[in-house]
Each structure stands twice: as structure tokens, then as C-alpha cells.
Image: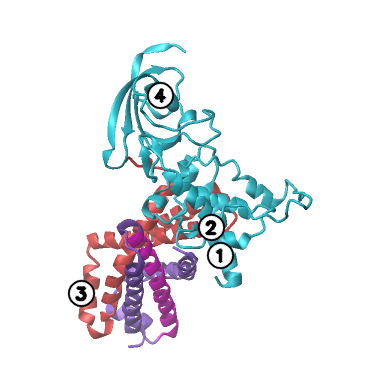
């Protein structure tokens, strides 16, 4: 059966939140493993940090930072919707504004590097 | 009504279970025509065995909801022109419910969940006591009023992706009903309601996707009602530790 | 998801919100001069504050990710009952162990 149209903003917010969370959860074990090599195998960590300097990898890192930021702001939006007695459009707008602001500032900072 | 020399190409889902198939019909197009008119025309002029539900035809009874071009609609108040630009209509039974036959969905799971969500009245007084006076401006009453126009059409239930993914989930209509009764000053057992919506398929399963609110034909806001239940259950969690 | 899982999910999220902001700030600061093992260790080693910051972060994220992935496993893969419980605990404890080792590696080991 055909599914209902999902192009309304809150469905997109839902799928973005779910996928960003899933990708972050998959990334975490790798992140933890590599860091834990700091003492026992510093060469491996340094090798990895060099690998992280490659431009393509930089873009991937930027993607991860964005996913982290967007998952956090998406989550704060959900908690505001659930726990604060606001009305729906206000919440969407507020979260959108903060999210966009943060998105832009992240770009700015990474550009400034 | 003037008959135009053109037709609608209508695909209707027939049968049930393993025997579901799509049947095509040509239906005369009119200037003013609802989706329910189209279904009725087929039943009256082509195939009297076509099975579907309707009663009031004016958007009050909630019995004629179907999937129209993939979206849940109350068919008696949905004009063909609003949902079809190319003279094509695809009509199917409501999503997320078992099919009895053709366009008739089995509503048992839907209404069963209303009872499971404790959306039933718990009286504060007996019939031998005077009727309680309610202030219509009261904050709780105002909140309860926001949900009372629900006609149980199950459009929200069919629109909800969480219902599709999680068979235990009580769904937007039942939870909105629970929130309405919870805010009813004349309801005596608020904690029974909070307990009923705090289990495995309760209000906490909702991901605030908002398709319920997006599709509700009466423009109610089940998503906000469910958020209210989340707030109320969270408060009681901190108070009672459960 | 019942009320206990919901509260675990939301409370761990509340704990993490300021930590995420801090973490992003550190990343932006550190990336400007290039990150090396020596640079990371110079910043974090022997620091009780960094240990508490990232220790709390790891604890909260283990709970949060376990509940979050649990919901996805249930909704998208149809996993239920004991299998679902077992997988959720495995994810939570696994992240806690891996994360705990990483925090110790850059602070006190």
C-alpha cells in the first residue's frame, strides 16, 4: 500500500533525528576505540589523526559535527514540545532558528580554521 | 449538476487477505463530486457487491474514511478536484488496520485501543447526587474541549508511521481521548489514565512525527494532546517515582 | 517504550545537552592548531575536570544510545521481548566499557 505523503516538516525532523542518532551510535565505538589507543599505541592514534587531515575526511568530520549538533537541537525541540506548554508552530520556529544559527556558526568556525 | 464529457480513472482495492486485487473503473466526472460520490456511483451503477462504509455524508459520523491516492481522507468531505489533478483516483481501505472486504477496514483494534488507553469515564458522583457545575472558562475544561470534536474516523491512526512500526502503540485517537478525559473535571480516576498510557505502547512511544495533526479532518491536534500526557506522566513519575 | 525507558532517554539527553556544546567548542578550538596525540594528552592528562566531563558524557551517552537503538531495532527490524532486552543491555554496557577505557586512556592511565 502506498504510504501517506511525508513531506511535512515534522516528519522530516523525525527522520533526521532518527538517522543522525543511528549514525552517531554506530560511530561511537570507533571513536572510543581509537582514543583508547592514546597511551598503549600512540603511533596508531597519530596515524589516525593524520588520516583525519585529508580534505575528504575533513568533510566527513564536518558531517559528524553537524549530525551531533542537529541531533542535539532536534532533541531539545522534542523536549520543549513535550515538557513546555508552548504551541506547536512556536516550537518549530524556535528550534529551527536555533538550529540554523548553530549550523551557520559551525560552518563559520570550521572555515576560520 | 452538469455532466462533462470526461471520465475519472478510478482504481479500487477489492477483496481481503491474500485475495486483494485492484480493479479499474471509469466514472463520469462532475464539477462537484466527492470521493464518496465516486465510490457510491460504482456501487450503484457498475458493481453492487462493492463493499464500503458510510452513514451521515456530512462529516459527522466518521465512518467513511479511506486511503485516497495514498493519503487518509474522510471521503464524504473530500472533493475529487482537491486530491486529483490528472483525473486519476486510487481508493483503498484505511492503512494500519486489517481489511474485512474491499474498502471496509476492521475497526476492532482501533476501538479496542480506546478502551486500553482508559479513555472511559470514571464518574465523580452517582445519579442520586446533584449535577456538578462546571465553569466553561476553567483551564482544564478548555484543554478538554480541544479534543471533544473527534469523530473516531481513524484517519490519524492510518496516517501514523509509529502505529505501522509498533503494533502495541495505542495511537493518536485513543491517546487524545485519554488526555481529554484526564482533563475532564468530572473524571474521578486520573491515575488510572496515567497508568494506562505509561505502558509499552503508551504515549511515550510517540515520536511527535505529527502526521495525525497534519491529516486530522477536524483540525484537532492529537500530537499536542500526547505531549500533554507525556508532561502529566513525567510529573507523576517525579512525584511518585513511577 | 514505557515511562522508565522514556525518562532514561530524556534525562540522559538533558545531562548531555551542555556536554555536547562543550565538546563541540573543544573540537573547534583544538582543530585550529591541528590535533596530535601529544596535544590531546597535554590537555587532558591528570585532569580531574576532564575526567568528570567525559566520564559523565560516556555514562549518559551509553544509556541514551542503548534506549535509542532499542527503539529502532524494535520498530524497523521487529525485534522484541528478551532478544530486544539483551541487545539493549549489550549496547549500553559495551559503550560504557569502550567509552570508559577511552576516557581513562586520555586522563589517568
- In the rendered structure, which segment of residues is drawn in magenta? C47-74
Are dots 2 and 1 in contact, CB under 8 Å?
yes
Color used for chain B? Answer: cyan
Residue beneath the point at 37% across and 80% down: C43
Image coordinates for residue B102, horizontal then vertical, percent = 35, 34
Q: Do marks 1 and 3 both belong to one polypeptide chain?
A: no
User: Which residue is found at the position 38% from the left and 24% from the top?
Assistant: B43
> Are both tags, 2 and 3, on one chain?
yes
**Could you tell me residue B221's position as x and y percent?**
54, 45
Label 3, label 4: how far apart the Cα atoms are: 68 Å
Q: Which chain carries label 2?
A: A
**Marks 3 and 4 share the same chain:** no
Counting from the top left corner in percent of width and height, residue B214 is at 47, 42
Labelled pair 4, 2 in contact (Cβ < 8 Å): no
Q: Answer few, some or many: residues within 10 Å of disc 1's Cα (few below 14, many 20 plus, some between 14 and 19).
A: many
Residue A54 is drawn in which quadrant? bottom left
Is residue A113 shown left or right of residue B107? Answer: left
Helix, strand or loop at disc 3? helix
Q: Residue A82 carries which label?
A: 2
Amino acid at each position: 500500500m502506498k504510504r501517506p505523503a511525508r513531506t511535512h516538516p515534522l516528519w522530516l525532523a523525525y527522520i533526521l533525528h532518527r538517522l543522525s542518532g543511528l549514525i552517531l551510535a554506530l560511530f561511537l565505538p570507533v571513536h572510543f576505540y581509537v582514543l583508547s589507543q592514546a597511551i598503549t599505541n600512540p603511533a596508531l592514534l597519530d596515524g589516525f589523526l593524520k588520516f583525519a587531515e585529508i580534505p575528504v575526511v575533513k568533510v566527513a568530520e564536518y558531517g559528524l559535527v553537524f549530525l551531533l549538533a542537529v541531533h542535539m537541537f532536534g532533541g531539545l525541540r522534542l523536549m520543549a514540545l513535550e515538557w513546555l506548554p508552548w504551541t506547536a508552530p512556536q516550537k518549530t520556529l524556535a528550534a529551527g532558528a536555533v538550529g540554523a544559527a548553530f549550523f551557520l556558526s559551525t560552518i563559520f568556525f570550521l572555515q576560520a580554521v | 449538476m452538469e455532466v462533462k464529457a470526461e471520465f475519472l480513472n478510478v482504481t479500487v482495492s477489492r477483496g481481503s487477505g491474500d485475495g486483494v486485487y485492484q480493479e479499474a473503473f471509469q466514472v463520469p466526472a462532475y464539477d462537484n463530486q466527492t470521493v464518496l460520490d465516486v465510490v457510491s456511483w460504482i456501487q450503484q451503477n457498475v458493481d453492487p457487491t462493492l463493499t464500503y462504509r458510510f452513514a451521515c455524508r456530512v462529516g459527522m459520523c466518521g465512518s467513511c474514511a479511506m486511503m485516497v491516492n495514498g493519503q487518509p481522507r474522510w471521503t464524504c468531505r473530500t472533493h475529487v478536484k482537491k486530491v486529483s489533478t490528472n483525473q486519476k483516483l486510487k481508493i483503498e481501505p484505511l492503512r494500519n488496520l486489517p481489511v474485512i472486504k474491499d474498502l471496509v477496514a476492521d475497526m476492532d483494534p482501533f476501538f479496542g485501543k480506546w478502551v486500553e488507553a482508559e479513555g472511559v469515564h470514571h464518574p465523580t458522583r452517582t445519579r442520586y447526587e446533584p449535577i456538578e457545575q462546571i465553569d466553561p472558562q476553567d483551564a482544564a475544561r478548555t484543554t478538554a474541549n480541544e479534543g471533544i470534536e473527534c469523530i473516531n474516523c481513524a484517519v490519524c491512526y492510518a496516517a501514523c508511521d509509529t502505529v505501522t512500526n509498533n503494533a502495541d502503540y495505542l495511537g493518536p485517537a485513543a491517546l487524545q481521548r485519554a488526555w481529554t478525559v484526564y482533563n475532564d473535571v468530572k473524571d474521578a480516576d486520573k491515575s488510572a489514565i496515567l497508568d494506562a498510557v505509561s505502558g509499552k505502547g503508551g504515549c511515550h512511544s510517540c515520536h511527535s512525527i505529527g502526521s495525525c495533526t497534519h491529516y486530522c479532518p477536524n483540525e484537532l491536534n492529537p500530537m499536542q494532546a500526547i505531549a500533554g500526557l507525556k508532561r502529566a506522566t513525567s510529573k507523576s513519575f517525579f512525584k511518585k517515582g513511577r | 517504550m514505557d515511562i522508565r525507558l522514556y525518562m532514561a532517554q530524556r534525562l540522559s539527553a538533558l545531562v548531555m545537552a551542555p556536554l555536547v556544546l562543550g565538546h563541540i567548542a573543544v573540537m573547534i578550538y583544538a582543530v585550529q592548531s591541528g590535533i596530535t596525540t601529544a596535544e590531546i594528552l597535554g590537555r587532558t592528562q591528570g585532569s580531574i575536570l576532564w575526567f568528570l566531563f567525559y566520564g559523565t558524557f560516556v555514562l549518559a551517552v551509553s544509556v541514551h544510545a542503548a534506549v535509542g537503538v532499542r527503539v529502532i531495532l524494535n520498530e524497523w527490524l521487529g525485534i522484541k521481548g528478551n532478544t530486544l532486552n539483551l541487545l539493549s543491555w549489550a549496547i549500553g554496557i559495551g559503550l560504557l566499557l569502550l567509552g570508559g577505557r577511552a576516557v581513562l586512556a586520555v586522563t589517568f592511565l
